[in-house]
Amino acid sequence: MQAKDIMTSNVVSISPAAGIRHAVAVMMQNNISGLPVVDDEGRICGILTEGDLLLRREIRHAPRTARNAEITSDVDLDRYIRGNGWSVRDIMSRDVIVASPDSEVSDIAESLEVHRIKRIPVVDVGRLVGIVSRRDILALIADATPLRLPREDDAILLAVRARLKYDLGLTPQRISVSVHNGQITLEGNVETELQRRAVLALVENLGSGSCLDRLQLAAD
C-alpha cells in the first residue's frame, strides 16, 4: 500500500507570512495539531506544529532574566525568535521530512516512529498534494483482517514453524512446536525474556485458541 492510497488530499495548510495567532486559530478550528506551510506556488517550505509553539511568550507568567547580548548563543536567539516572532515563517520547522505519492506506507510509518513526528506531507513535483498522519496509519490497523490459523493440527504446526523462522529466525532446532487438538505447545530455550515475549506475541497474533508455554531461558 502506498501514500496515495491513504493520504488526506484536502490538506489544511498555511502561508509562511501568516500570523501566529491566525495559525493557532486555524489549527483549533480544524482540530489538527500541525500545518504544512506552503508558498504562493504551492511548494512546501516548512511545517508548524503544536511543539513549535511551546516556547511562546504568551504562555509565560514572567519574562526570563535578560542576558548580556555578547554571550547570547545561537540557541538562545532561536528560542527568543520562537517565543516572540510574529509570523509562521519565524516559528515553523524548516527541515521537513516528506514522502511521495508512491512511498510505501510501511516506510512512512517507520519515519514517523524514528523521527518522533505525527505527520508527513506528501509532495509531487515539489508541490503539496496530501498528508499522512499517525491516525491514517492507525486506521489501517483497525481495518486489517485478523490472521487466523487453519483448524487442522498439521496445518497449524506448519504455519507456526514458518512464522517463527521467517519473523524471528527461530528454527525447529531452537523452538520445538507441537499441536494437539488445536493447542500449541512451545518448548526449547530462548536467550532472553524479551525473546520469549516475541515468540508468544507471534503465536497470539496468529489467532491461536490456546498456547502452552514451556520455553526456558538459556541461562536457566
Image (tube, rainbow, N blue to C red):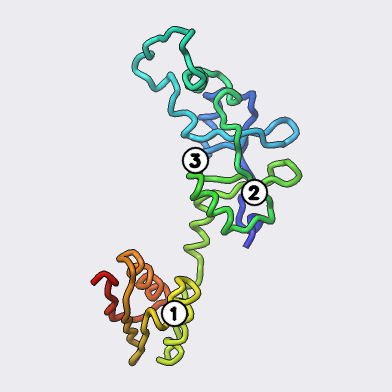
Dot 1: what SS? loop
Point out the frontmost of discs 2 and 3. Answer: 2
Residue at 32 percent of width and 84 percent of height: 185
Task: Report, in whole angstroms, how far the alpha carbon at label 2 lies from the one at label 3.
Answer: 23 Å
Q: Quadrant of residue 213?
A: bottom left
| Relative height, residue 1 to residue 152 (above, below) | above
Residue that badge 2 annotates: 99
Residue 10 location, x and y as percent? 64, 46
Q: Would residue 120 be seen by someone viewing this image from the given angle?
A: yes
Dot 2 or dot 1, earlier in sequence: 2
Q: Residues within 10 Å of mark 1 (few under 14, many from 20)?
A: some
Image quarter (top left, top right, bottom left or bottom right) of the N terminus? bottom right
Residue that badge 1 annotates: 171
Residue 43 location, x and y as percent? 71, 36
Point out the frontmost of discs 2 and 1. Answer: 1
- At label 3, the amino acid type is Asn
| Relative height, residue 71 to residue 199 (above, below) | above
Residue that badge 3 annotates: 31
Dot 2 or dot 3, earlier in sequence: 3
